[in-house]
Amino acid sequence: MLTVYFDFLCPYAWRGIELLNALELEFEAVHYSLVQGNHSDNKGLPRANPVWKLVEQPVESDNAYQRESLTAFLASHAAAQQGSALHRAFILELFRLRHRDSRSLDAAATLEAATIAKLDLERFAADQRDESARRVDLSRDLERAGRLGVFGTPTIELDDGKAAYFRFATLPEGKAAQRAAWELYLNVLDSDAGIETIKRAKPGANA
């Protein structure tokens, strides 16, 4: 099964999840924190050994990215207690609320995503209240992402262990275009050319 490392803050991760959903590809969802990865205290350190860890921070914070990211991750792990299919449904709905509907990643949004995804809401609430267990779950994910060397989202790992960050400017429309985008990703990973980065030039962009 595919493994997808993602952060709810990232629109590129949303498009990647939407692509896999459109192609009906199942995946294991693993959380990666852009807030932790880009934190100044972790600059220059191996990604597997950060000194500033999101999982050790309070949910309430003046930093909106930190607050929303941690809120979403803990809620996502609460959803995961109801099985991978419902977890993927929750992830997709929360991504849509954030990036399609411009909602904040707060308690109201996570409850709405859980409702749309048809989770057992009583169990969802109970699993959210067990915050210490959810932090342990999240810590495992972040450590796993660190060992792999994830730096951006979505990073997609194949069954054979090959993995790469795949950034979508837009979500391809129609099954043929979506399938072609996915095949392109697979072909780049399988190529003997050793391609690591493709980045479009942006005329007029600041240095």
Image: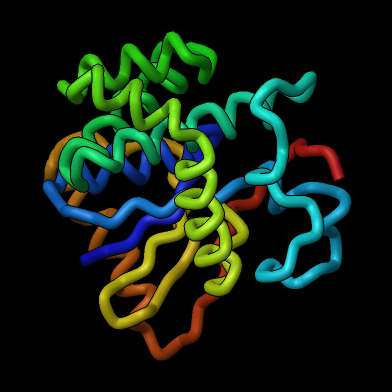
At 41% from the left and 28% from the top, the residue drawn is 128
Which image quadrant: the C terminus? top right
Foreground: 109 or 195? Answer: 109
Query: In the displayed structure, would residue 81 be above or below residue 180?
Result: above
What's the image's color scheme?
rainbow
Of residue 81 and residue 196, the one placed in the foreground of this image is 81
Decide: is 101 above or below 147.
above
Is residue 34 toward the left or the right of residue 63 in the image? left
The image shows residue 35 at horizontal and vertical percentages of 69, 42
Q: Is residue 64 visible?
A: yes
Quadrant of the rendering where the N terminus is positioned = bottom left
Q: Is residue 84 left or right of residue 161?
A: left
Could you say which quadrant of the image residue 166 lies in? bottom left
For this rendering, which residue is in front, 40 or 128?
128
Residue that protrudes farthest toward the bottom in the picture: 192
> Measured from the top left, where is residue 22 in percent x and y?
17, 40
Count of numbered circles on the image: 0
Residue at 30%, 42% in the rendered image: 80
Residue at horizontal 53 percent and vertical 73 percent from the top:
148
Query: Could you say which quadrant of the image residue 65 lies in?
Result: top right
> What is the x, y in percent for residue 170?
40, 36
Q: Left or right: where does residue 29 sit relative to residue 40? A: left
Residue at image x 21%, y 38%? Answer: 82
Whether residue 153 is visible, yes or no, is no
Q: Position of residue 44 (x, y in %)?
A: 85, 67
In the displayed structure image, the side of residue 25 where residue 153 appears, left or right: right
